[in-house]
């Protein structure tokens, strides 16, 4: 596992069948984070996106090394370990991580969204359709099928979900695509200190899409921070109107996808169910 780069592993941050993320130390004593990913497409996408973001001046952890191993097939990404803790955790534990920090995340997210993309640009993780908008319908269909078979969507809720996603596709189809994070939860932003730098991490799902999807996912469980994020982002009238129109559809779609992921990976989905139902009413 790229032993030339990493001499020892420490604390596990993530560990499931698809991915392992752990603290590590290189042979010359540098603190790093090691990501081992069974999704080779996601690994390659993350390496490519990190390269583009670094060239564009987005504040990201530096890449120490990358490798692909054969047995079992996996991508290994070694990143410099930077100070900070996830935004969601920081916001819950310390009220000082308030409006200023969320606005700073909005500002950095805007910088990510205008990053030049090497043509034709990567599709967002998990889809092969011709466009981001074309991906939304099949994604919603898969969520509803899972929800009905597993019992976490009633027939009426599935109908409402279908209607919201259909409206969302109509809203999104004519809008330009930009590079988006793709899994822009607060857990994927590191914050070192109040007023300090903020950094996006875990970019394996990044690709071309609607920037409003990132904005909605970022504030999915803490929507009261959305105004600060939009102010930091520098959102104009048109973008704010698009956020207002698309937010409910994106919430329903993301929460449905979260239910599928949690159940398929053996995690308890019960905290997500009331949020999904709220998005559907």
Image: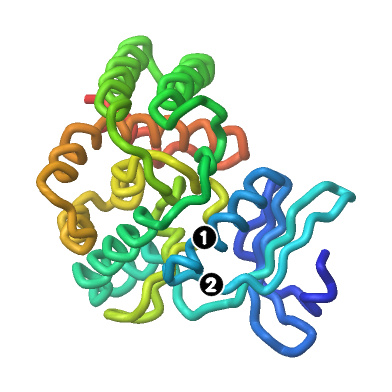
| Colouring chosen for the image of the structure | rainbow
Which residue is painted at 14% across and 50% down in the image? 236
Where is residue 95, by image quadrant? bottom left
Count of numbered labels shown in the rendering? 2
Check the image and report above or below for 28 versus 115. below
Check the image and report above or below for 166 versus 214. above
According to the picture, the residue beneath numbered tag 1 turns out to be: 52
* Residue 61 numbered tag: 2
Camera sees residue 268: no
Camera sees residue 154: yes
Residue 219 lies left or right of residue 268; in this view the side is left
Q: Secondary structure at mark 1?
A: helix
Where is residue 238, by image quadrant? top left
Q: For this rendering, which residue is in front, 92 or 30?
A: 30
Please state, as top left, top right, bottom left or bottom right, where the N terminus lies in the image: bottom right
Q: Earlier in the sequence, mark 1 or mark 2?
A: 1
């Amino acid at each position: 596992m790229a032993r030339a780069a990493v001499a020892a592993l420490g604390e596990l941050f993530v560990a499931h069948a698809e991915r392992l993320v752990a603290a590590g130390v290189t042979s010359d004593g540098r603190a790093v984070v090691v990501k081992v990913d069974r999704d080779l497409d996601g690994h390659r996408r993350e390496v490519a996106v990190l390269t583009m973001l670094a060239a564009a001046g987005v504040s990201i952890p530096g890449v120490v090394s990358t490798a692909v191993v054969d047995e079992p097939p996996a991508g290994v990404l070694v990143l410099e370990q930077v100070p900070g803790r996830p935004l969601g955790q920081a916001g819950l534990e310390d009220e000082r991580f308030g409006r200023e920090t969320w606005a700073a995340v909005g500002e950095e997210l805007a910088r990510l969204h205008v990053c030049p993309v090497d043509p034709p640009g990567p599709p967002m993780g998990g889809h092969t359709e011709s466009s981001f908008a074309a991906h939304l319908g099949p994604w919603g269909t898969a969520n509803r099928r899972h929800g009905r078979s597993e019992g976490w969507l009633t027939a009426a809720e599935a109908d409402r979900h279908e209607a919201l996603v259909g409206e969302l596709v109509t809203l999104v189809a004519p809008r330009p695509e930009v590079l988006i994070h793709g899994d822009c939860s607060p857990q994927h932003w590191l914050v070192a200190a109040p007023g300090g730098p903020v950094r996006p991490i875990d970019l394996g799902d990044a690709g071309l899409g609607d920037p409003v999807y990132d904005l909605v996912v970022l504030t999915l469980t803490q929507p009261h921070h959305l105004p600060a994020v939009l102010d930091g982002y520098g959102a104009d009238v048109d973008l704010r109107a698009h956020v207002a129109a698309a937010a409910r559809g994106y919430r329903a779609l993301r929460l449905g996808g979260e239910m599928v992921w949690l159940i398929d990976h053996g995690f308890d989905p019960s905290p997500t169910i009331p949020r999904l139902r709220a998005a559907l009413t």
